[in-house]
Image (tube, rainbow, N blue to C red):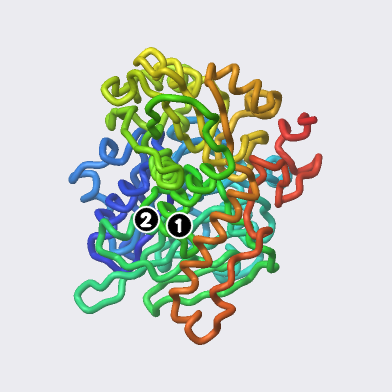
Amino acid sequence: MCGVFGIFGHPEAANMTYLGLHALQHRGQESCGIVSTEGERLYSHRAMGRVQAAFDSATLGTLRGDRAIGHVRYSTAGGSHLKNAQPIGVDWARGSLAVAHNGNLTNFESLRERLEARGSIFQTASDTESVVHLIALSESTDQEARIADALRQVEGAYSILFLDERRLIAARDPLGLRPLCLGVLQHEGRTVHVVASEPNAFDLIGARLVRDVAPGELIVIDESGLRSSFPFAPAVRKMCLFEYVYFARPDSILEGASVYEVRKALGRRLADEAPLPPGDGDTVVVPVPDSGVPAAIGLADRARLPFEMGLIRSHYVGRTFIEPQQSIRHFGVRLKLNPNRAVIEGKRVIIVDDSIVRGTTSRKIVKMVRDAGAREVHVRISSPPTRWPCYYGIDTPTRAELIASTHDVSEIARYLTADSLGYLSLEGLVDAVRTVEARARATTSAAASDPSAADAPAPDTYCHACFSGNYPVPFSPASGPRHLRMLP
């Protein structure tokens, strides 16, 4: 769940990239970086920590040129060290190249072994570096062809940007597991192209969303404009459902669907699938902010119950789920949330959250709400039980650490000390996302001339491996992550 941003053709490219990364900060908080060029050489700055702390006006002033790419990171492959921060930049016989990658390459270990056997020396522990070595070894003479040749050899998830002295290249894996969007803005009569993980990064710089980068698409942007190709074998789209549930910002549009509207639809469906047990007394719907808010609005609306901000979030603490240290994750709930006793005391409280991973945070939230005087505490989750790890760019725990992999719903409810617990079904999640996507498609110009363009996406066009264990990229003993092969 990293974030990438790229821009070509703006005299303040580094400043624009800084703003774009600021809008994508929710996708990664442990390191960040920007690489720019004026067409002669690449300029780079990478740092640990968040964007606002890592860059000041003096630093941005050293990043010259009208084109740049940037990255915000949290680690999936490779540890939390500066050497693994991106964009990765290299100098080689054909010039310079920088790479910014969101995703995870599932055959990284076998790739690295093969590359090291051929003499490659790795400077980082990041899977992204293997792409750089594959590009260097390609026998193609054109940079675009070399990149396509390298990406054909990798498996897994990548929404990836490349920058050399002449061009910006963007690619998305054939399954479309991670989001990538294309936008434009006008500057002094010239069209400036921008690429980002989410389109909310465009809003801050005054750019307009054009479309999603299609799965399997490779886009080249240079002085002559933009051109697109599809150099990879076609595959069925497998957009990550957890992007809609948690990762993406609610003001983003993914595959044409409003993330905010999807999350409200999840809440409405959750109200139907997991109604509150009979009982007496005032009832309030309380979200776990921020990602639980839209679903709680949808649930409260469908159940005709009052919505209240019964948990107040400190906006000076990051999203604890993506903090790298276990100690911070456990302590973070007390730093992040505080119960609002005025709306909780004496009430039946329905806590709405997006997911339960280990269960430790949810247990502490239930305890906080009870300590604030709630008469009953019922927990509702706007996604199915998370039973399987993700290997496509999300730092979920091993299966043994996922509470739903070893406990049923009643057992989890007892662990949380909740009066009841209800999850959204996988069918309900898929149907809600498909419905919002179809509604968005119906408003496009294509649907006006071709009604079939408004059809809902097929149910098999989403990745739900973390819920179902159905991994769209097959693993083998030679290519899969070592810990995956130990799963039952």
Which residue occupies the extreme top position in the image?
A: 371
Point out the tag, 1 or 2, that comes first from the N-terminus.
2
* The C terminus lies in quadrant: top right
How far is disc 1 from disc 2 in space, using C-alphas? 7 Å
Which amino acid is tagged 2? Leu
Q: Is residue 371 above or below residue 305?
A: above
Residue 27 visible, this orientation: no
Closest to the observer, 450 or 109: 450
Residue 42, which numbered label? 2
Residue 165: quadrant of the picture: bottom left
Q: Is residue 458 above or below residue 31?
A: below
User: Badge 2, how many Cα within 10 Å: few under 14, some, many 20+?
Assistant: many
- Expressed as whole percent of the image width and height from the top left, the position of residue 209 reads 37, 67
- Expressed as whole percent of the image width and height from the top left, the position of residue 146 reads 60, 65
Q: Residue at x 44, y 40 (%)?
A: 73
Q: In this view, does 168 lie above or below 91?
A: below
What secondary structure is marked by label 1? strand
